[in-house]
Amino acid sequence: PSAKALALAGIAKAMAEIGATEQAIDMLKQSQGDVVKISNEGIKAYVLVNIAKTAAAVEDFRLARDVASIQVNEARKLVTLASILETWARSKDPLLADTIWEY
């Protein structure tokens, strides 16, 4: 299941980059369903962050938040939420987003 979920998230990211937003969101939802089957918490957390970041990139913040809510623990949830925020900030002003991490 981990390879499938990661592959679907990667395909969704590529689709989002070429403007196929609706298809990307469908892939992200499918990968979200598959990721719950992953038993390795490290891999699961990694895949969930990638799904959430891609969902944020296509401006589906509800899906991104839902993905963050199923993270493996509270610390990973906060990392995922920070990644969503970073993705949003970069979409608004790439220069501003770079200065966020200087402090």
Image (tube, rainbow, N blue to C red):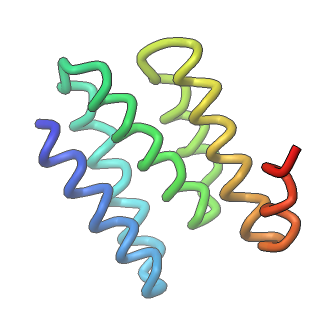
- Where is residue 45 drawn, in percent x and y? 38, 29
Q: Where on the picture, by quarter, is residue 14? A: bottom left
Write the residue at 26% across / 34% down: 35
Q: From this viewpoint, which residue is outermost toward the front?
A: 102
- Where is residue 49 drawn, in percent x and y? 47, 41
- Where is residue 17 drawn, in percent x and y? 46, 80
Write the residue at 24% across / 49% down: 6
68 sits left or right of 89 in the view = left
Q: Is residue 82 above or below residue 97?
A: above
50 sits left or right of 74 in the view = left
- Where is residue 56 drawn, in percent x and y? 60, 56
34 sits left or right of 69 in the view = left
Q: Is residue 77 above or below residue 21?
A: above
Q: Where on the picture, by quarter, is residue 78? A: top right
Q: Quadrant of the N terminus?
A: top left
Q: From this viewpoint, which residue is outermost toward the top?
A: 73
Write the residue at 57% across / 66% down: 58
23 sits left or right of 103 in the view = left
Write the residue at 80% across / 61% down: 97
Q: From this viewpoint, which residue is outermost toward the bottom?
A: 18
